Image (spheres, helix red, strand yellow):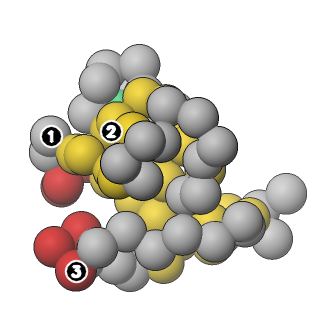
Amino acid sequence: MGKVYIDFDPQQGFPKENNLFYECQSCHVEIPSAPKENLCCKCFNIFYDVDEDKFSVQDTSKIALFKKS
Ligand SMILES: [Zn+2]
């Protein structure tokens, strides 16, 4: 499967689709954009809270959005 990176502005919110994923560019963990549970990457840069349905990102320069194709 290939990755197609998509430009996005974290200030404008976090797109959620089944085939979209976030990648932490510090620890290179991939996180689904529409998770069903609390998730965080290894370095805790990206955290998703399922109760609040919200992504929290410490360093927005270290996050990328991509589509699997
Ligand atoms: Zn990370």
Amino acid type, callout 2: Ile
Numbered badge on residue 12:
3
Question: Residue at the location (85% across, 57% down)?
Answer: 1
Residue 23 location (% of width, % of height): 47, 48
Mark 2 neighbour class, 10 Å CA radius: few under 14, some 14 to 19, many 20 or more: many
Mark 2 or mark 1: which comes first in sequence? 2
Question: Is 5 drawn above or below residue 46 in the view shown?
Answer: below
Residue 62 location (% of width, % of height): 25, 48
Residues under numbered marks 2 and 3 in contact, where contact means CB atoms less than 8 Å apart: no
Q: Is residue 1 visible?
A: yes
Question: Residue at the location (24% across, 69% down)?
Answer: 10
Amino acid type, callout 1: Gln
39 left or right of 34 in image: left
Residues under numbered marks 2 and 1 in contact, where contact means CB atoms less than 8 Å apart: yes
Question: Is 18 drawn above or below residue 25 in the view shown?
Answer: below
Mark 1 neighbour class, 10 Å CA radius: few under 14, some 14 to 19, many 20 or more: few
36 left or right of 11 in image: right
Question: Is 9 drawn above or below residue 24 in the view shown?
Answer: below
**Of 1 and 45, the residue lying toward us:** 45
The residue pinned by badge 1 equals 58
Residue 45 location (% of width, % of height): 26, 33
